[in-house]
Amino acid sequence: MSALLHYNYWIVILLMMIGFYIVITHANLIKKLLGLSIFQTSVFILYISMGKISGGTAPILYPGEHVYSNPLPHVLILTAIVVGIATTALGLALVVRLREAYGSIVEDVIQQQEQEDQR
Amino acid sequence: MEMLVDVFLLGLLVATAVAISSTKDLFASIMLTGLYSLISAAFFVLMDAVDVAFTEAAVGAGISTLLMLSCMKLTGQYEPKPHRHRRLLGLVVVSVTGVLLLFGTLDTPNFGDDHSPIQDHLAPHYLTKSMEEIGIPNVVTSVLASYRGFDTFGETVVILTAGIGVLALLGFSPKRQSDDLDSLVAPMHHQKILRVVSKLLIPPILLFALYVQFHGDFGPGGGFQAGVIFAAAIILYAMIFGVHVARQVFRDGAIRLLAALGVLIYGSVGLLSFLSGKNFLDYSVLSDTPQHGQHWGIMLVEMGVGITVAAVMLIIFFTFSARVDKRERDGDENQRQ
């Protein structure tokens, strides 16, 4: 059982690294945004895991003695999710504009064209 | 038992993430991302974060997938495989970073520990005092809308800004002729089953959004979730009966106005308490008793959040789908030439 005490954090790091890997190796910009959202979700999982108390329940008060999990990370992450979708939408809009300007959303092709334009 | 589900769900998340990384078809990756969000929502329920799970299910699995798909439609479905040396280099960088981070976890408090530092300072105050200070059972809503109301105000402004940003990047395309609108037929319009089922589903979804909006004080829910669910119902309608039909009711000018109105409501409540001699967003002066004032303040502020979130989601969706329509029409014209 003691091996599992940090299990959630290890998974968080694994997910974060998968997201990071996608962002740095894939050239397609939509794929990069997908990687970024995996990265983002891993941070959400980190926060929420930290707030959990064993045997606790959701922080909605009701009469009697109960153990509640920490509500603060929940608040931070809840707003982060909605802000995350808003910024992702902005990123996607940029991708669409890049495609219209360069005819491609592959990073290498865009950079190549940019270099040719500068010559 | 709880731990077993935890291990299983997180394992599933890793498997999905690996699949997202390895598939070359963007359509598959995007659908897998939707699945990934849904699994993480299930995980959040397990972690007692019901409000977060609610938001993740509505946003991540619903709206986000949809936006990614519209973007993919505009840009192409397949991606080239990354070069070998790039993959190798990426793997090295990622492994080194990962090992360093793993080293960091050795000092973290144990999972589920009720004496870890995070549980020590603010949380006990919120959990023990919020009932008498704010007077509503859902602590997450108390913290979101009252204790950390200023934060949430900032986040609402960020959402509005993102909406404005999307409009600035994609919104102002050349005006289309009005007869053009009638010629646009929604691609799913001839699907009888979808039409009937969606007609049955949309009113309950809208009603549910309102329930989530106003019941957020007592159960999971609130402005953020309600806004997204409300927008999802309209988007469902738009997808099946045609975006131009939905836009006749939710006119561009009106939803832009609503997006700003939500922030305005939020800010005005803050200003009102400010002018009544208290701190910005201290609602206790809004009514005769402080607790009653808090109730009013939270309700108004959540309403502001709900209106802004719903309007911005609609703005973003309409802007993207207008681009898709335009692309298709241009494609038709090119073929005719």
Image: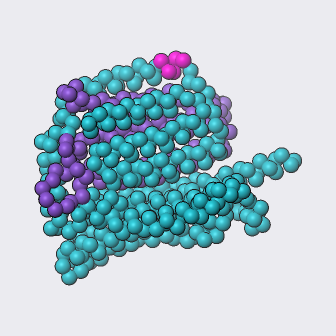
Chain colours: A purple, B cyan
Q: Residue at x 32, y 52 (%)?
A: B50
- The residue positioned farthest toward the right in the image shown: B337
Does residue B87 belong to the magenta stretch? yes
- The residue positioned farthest toward the bottom in the image shown: B288
- The relative height of residue B91 versus residue B114 in the rendered view (above or below) is above
Res B98 → quadrant:
top left
Q: How many marks?
A: 0
- The relative height of residue B142 versus residue B17 in the rendered view (above or below) is below
Q: Residue at x 76, y 51 (%)?
A: B330
Res B240 → quadrant:
bottom right
Magenta stretch: dominant secondary structure: helix
| Left or right of residue A59: residue B129 | left
Foreground of the two, A55 or B212: A55
| Left or right of residue B299: residue A3 | left
Q: Is residue B218 visible?
A: yes
Residue B171 drawn at (x, y percent): 61, 58
Residue B300 drawn at (x, y percent): 34, 72
Q: Residue at x 60, y 48 (%)?
A: B70
Residue B160 drawn at (x, y percent): 46, 60
| Left or right of residue B316: residue B328 | right
Q: Residue at x 53, y 46 (%)?
A: B65
- The relative height of residue B17 versus residue B85 in the rendered view (above or below) is below
**What stretch of residues is rendered in magenta?**
B84-88
- The relative height of residue B236 versus residue A9 in the rendered view (above or below) is below
Foreground of the two, B197 or B269: B197
Foreground of the two, B192 or B44: B192
Q: Is residue B277 visible?
A: no
Q: Tell me the quadrant of the picture where the N terminus of chain B can be found.
A: top left
| Left or right of residue A118: residue B217 | left
